[in-house]
Image (tube, rainbow, N blue to C red):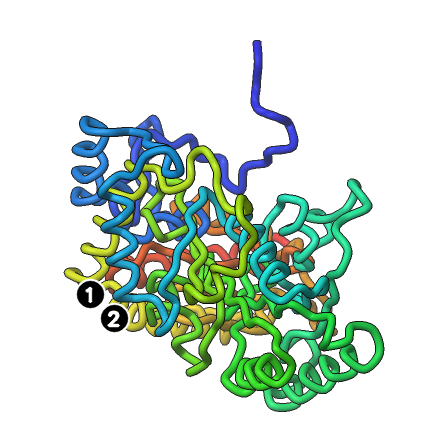
């Protein structure tokens, strides 16, 4: 009998039968608060009726129309609708299926458009698991080890992760920009550099938000040296942070945006967006694919945009995100083992550390398991997997946030007691 690969480890023991909103139900009917949202994918909640209806209707009309062979209306309409929410000037789109594929497409575009070989990423980055995307990923060795040589031309600069360094944010930011300039002077000439790839909030790296000064520093250096600023908004986009795009918090204009995850409420769809003039610099034949821009996924994405707008989900993410982070911080004040709570909108991470400031992976994992046993599903992240992250759907309400915080409080208390 064939089975799943043994390398696929579940974060929780739950076998899901169905989902509804921010809840999933196992085969016995037990309800769980799902604060994983499929790793930030089910932006409108599980099985939102409008998304379900749009997908069902499209399945009955056209499931797959390969978009370099024939064109279909859902894809054309999605381009128009995305034009209403994309950063100004990003008016050309290329669709694929996953975040990794979109990152690969952005990488290829950057090298084609500039004629330069090098890319700068930032410590703690996660950009995907395929060869090029994994080569840009520094959030953990598990994503890029054991299949060397990985792609060359990638250089790593510090991210302003203040808690990690033990500094205030200003000091961490000044350090990060100074080290970027040192990298330019010693190992990666700006004249050889095609792009910066940056997440507005580190995802797998520990839910660490960037800041205005750091991103403005990248933008200034990009303009001075002819480097492209690529915003990886795979996890932060589509309202997740309480603004439509993560970079909207910081007033910085990207040259390329990468989006996926919440774009289609669970259907596989991703894209890169760039100015038409820039997109035209990609070489002929360099963009394509069998399933990109799938008709059903596009229909789901259109319904997702409608729900986000009509139900005020960006504003809800901001309000509920504030409530969630305040709740998580109240739990941290009761337990010294949580050294830092941070995030933007509905991306909230709690970092567990020992009294001497070292990563406390064991307690973090016990807390995450305790939460699942109590009916709250959470995920881990961070280089040492000592950060527990909360990523509920954008439809989450105050009562559900408060329920999650109470379960989290009980879970941390139990995890600490079990470790004594």
For the view shown, which residue lies furthest in the front direction? Answer: 284
Side of 238 relative to 254 (left or right): left
Mark 2 and mark 1 residues within 8 Å of each other at the beta carbon? yes
In the rendered image, residue 242, in percent from the top left (x then y), is placed at 34, 70
Question: Which residue: 49% across, 65% down?
Answer: 278
- In the image, residue 105 above or below residue 55: below
Side of 162 relative to 191 (left or right): left
Residue located beneath label 2 in the image: 315
Q: Which of 240 and 92 is in front in this view?
A: 92
- Residue at mark 2 to residue at mark 1: CA–CA distance: 6 Å
For residue 417, say whether it is visible: no
Helix or strand or loop: what does disc 1 sit on? loop
Q: In which quarter of the image is residue 314?
A: bottom left
In the rendered image, residue 389, in percent from the top left (x then y), is placed at 49, 59
**Label 1, residues with CA under 10 Å away: few <14, some 14-19, many ≥20:** some
Residue located beneath label 1 in the image: 312
In the rendered image, residue 391, in percent from the top left (x then y), is placed at 41, 57
Side of 144 relative to 78 (left or right): right
Question: Which residue: 39% across, 45% down?
Answer: 269
Q: Nearer the viewer, residue 59 or 398?
A: 59
Assign the C terminus to one quadrant of the image. Answer: bottom right
The circle drawn on residue 113 is none
């Amino acid at each position: 009998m064939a089975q799943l690969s043994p390398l696929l480890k579940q974060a929780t023991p739950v076998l899901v039968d169905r989902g509804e909103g921010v809840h999933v139900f196992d085969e016995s009917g037990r309800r769980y608060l799902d604060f994983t949202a499929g790793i930030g994918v089910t932006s409108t909640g599980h099985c939102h009726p409008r998304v379900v209806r749009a997908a069902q209707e499209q399945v009955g009309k056209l499931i797959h129309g390969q978009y370099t062979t024939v064109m279909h209306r859902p894809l054309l309409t999605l381009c128009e609708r995305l034009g209403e929410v994309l950063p100004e000037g990003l008016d050309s789109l290329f669709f694929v299926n996953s975040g990794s594929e979109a990152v690969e497409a952005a990488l290829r575009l950057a090298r084609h458009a500039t004629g330069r070989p090098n890319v700068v990423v930032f410590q703690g980055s996660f950009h995907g698991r395929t060869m090029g995307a994994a080569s840009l990923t520094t959030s953990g060795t598990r994503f890029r080890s054991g299949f060397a040589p990985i792609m060359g031309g990638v250089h790593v600069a510090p991210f302003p992760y203040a808690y990690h360094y033990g500094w205030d944010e200003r000091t961490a930011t000044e350090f990060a920009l100074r080290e970027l300039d040192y990298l330019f002077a010693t190992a990666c000439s700006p004249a050889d550099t095609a792009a910066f790839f940056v997440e507005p909030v580190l995802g797998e790296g520990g839910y660490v938000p960037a800041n205005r000064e750091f991103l403005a520093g990248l933008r200034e250096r990009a303009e001075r040296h002819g480097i492209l600023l690529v915003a990886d908004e795979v996890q932060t986009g589509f309202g997740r942070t309480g603004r439509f795009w993560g970079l909207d918090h910081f007033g910085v204009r990207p040259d390329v945006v990468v989006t996926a995850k919440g774009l289609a409420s669970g259907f596989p769809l991703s894209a890169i967006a760039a100015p038409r003039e820039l997109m035209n610099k990609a070489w002929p034949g360099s963009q394509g694919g069998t399933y990109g821009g799938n008709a059903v996924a596009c229909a789901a994405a259109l319904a997702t945009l409608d729900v986000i707008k009509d139900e005020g989900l960006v504003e809800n993410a901001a309000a509920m995100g504030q409530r969630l982070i305040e709740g998580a911080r109240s739990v941290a004040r009761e337990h010294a083992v949580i050294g830092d709570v941070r995030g933007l909108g509905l991306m909230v991470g709690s970092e567990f550390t020992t009294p001497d400031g070292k990563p406390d992976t064991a307690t973090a994992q016990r807390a995450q398991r305790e939460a699942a046993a109590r009916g709250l599903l959470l995920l881990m992240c961070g280089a040492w997997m000592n950060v527990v992250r909360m990523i509920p759907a954008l439809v989450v309400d105050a009562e559900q946030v408060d329920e999650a915080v109470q379960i989290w409080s009980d879970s941390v208390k139990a995890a600490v007691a079990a470790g004594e």
